[in-house]
Amino acid sequence: MTSARDFLSRQTRESDENLRVEATDDGVIIELLQPPDRLEFRHSYVETAFFKRAQQSRQALLKACNNRQRSIHSILDLTGGWGMDSFILAQHGQRVTMIEYDRLVYSISSHSLECARSIRRSATAAGRIETIHANALQFLQNLDKKDPFDCIYLDPMFPAHHSSAKPAKEMQILQYLTSNENIEDCFDLALLKAGNRVVVKRPAKAPTLTDLSPDLVIREKTIRFDVYLTQGC
Ligand SMILES: C[S@@+](CC[C@H](N)C(=O)[O-])C[C@H]1O[C@@H](n2cnc3c(N)ncnc32)[C@H](O)[C@@H]1O
C-alpha cells in the first residue's frame, strides 16, 4: 500500500499546477496559488500555536462532545478534514476514528499524524486517532450497531455566503480541494447509530443542518455546536 508520504511526494509532481504539497518531518506544507493570492498553510499537530490551543480545556468542542458523567470515550469524526478537531478531542483523552473521503486531504492528515506519533509531547494524543480513507455515508452504513461510537461528530464545510470575511487560509485551501458529500444523509444515519449523541459544528448564526432542533447548543464567538442526544443516553 502507498504510504501517505509516498502519495504526497507524487502529488508534488502530478497535482495541478496551482498546488504544491511537500511532506516534512513534522507535517506538510501546502501552497495554493489563487492569483492574486498565494496561500500557504503548514499543516502540523506539533506546531506551537496549534498545540497550545489543543491543550486548552475550556473549549466548546470538548463540552459538546462530552457529558456530565464523562462516559463518552469513543468519537467518530465523519468529516475529518485537517484533523484539527479530532486532535483536540484526542488530546483530552478521547479515542477518535476520523473519516475523510478526499485522498489528498486524508494523506496530509495521515502524514502529520505519523509525525506527531514520533514526537514525545504529541505521541499519546496522536496514538488515540485512527484515520480512515472512506466516504462517511458508506462507513456509517456498514457500521455495526451493537458496538456504537458514543459520539458522532460532523463539521461540514460552512456555506460560502455566510460571511463577507474570507475564511482562514487553511479553510480556503480545504474549500478548493473538497466539498460536502451526503452530509444530510450522514446526519440522519448518525442519529440512528450514535450511542449517546451527534454533534454538528455550525457558524454561529447559520440555520440548523436540517429541520430537527438540537437538544443542546454550545456557543463560541463565531461558531456553535448543535448537540442531538440519541437513544443511548
Ligand atoms: C470543514 S472540513 C472539516 C474540518 C475538520 N473538522 C478539522 O478540524 O480540520 C469538512 C471535511 O469533510 C470532508 N467530507 C465532506 N463530506 C464527506 C463525506 N461524505 N465523507 C468523508 N468526508 C467528507 C471534506 O472533504 C472536508 O475535508
Image (spheres, helix red, strand yellow):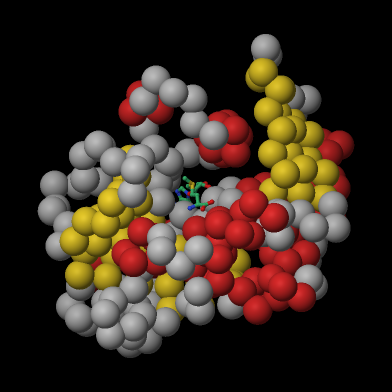
Front in this rendered view, residue 22 or 53: 53
Give coordinates of residue 233: x percent, y percent: 20, 81
Image height of 228 relative to 42, above or below = below
Q: Is residue 85 left or right of residue 16?
A: left
Residue in the picture at 18% in, 61% down: 216
Give coordinates of residue 24: x percent, y percent: 84, 52
Front in this rendered view, residue 67 or 174: 67
Front in this rendered view, residue 104 or 20: 20
Image height of 68 relative to 216, above or below = below
Residue in the picture at 36% in, 32% down: 159
Residue in the picture at 40% in, 27% down: 160
Give coordinates of residue 186: x percent, y percent: 33, 57
Give coordinates of residue 12: x percent, y percent: 83, 39
Q: Quadrant of residue 16?
A: top right
Q: Is residue 37 left or right of residue 194?
A: right
For the N terminus, give its image quadrant: bottom right
Q: Quadrant of residue 158?
A: top left
Q: Is residue 13 left or right of residue 84?
A: right
Image height of 64 relative to 28, above or below = below
Residue in the picture at 20% in, 73% down: 230
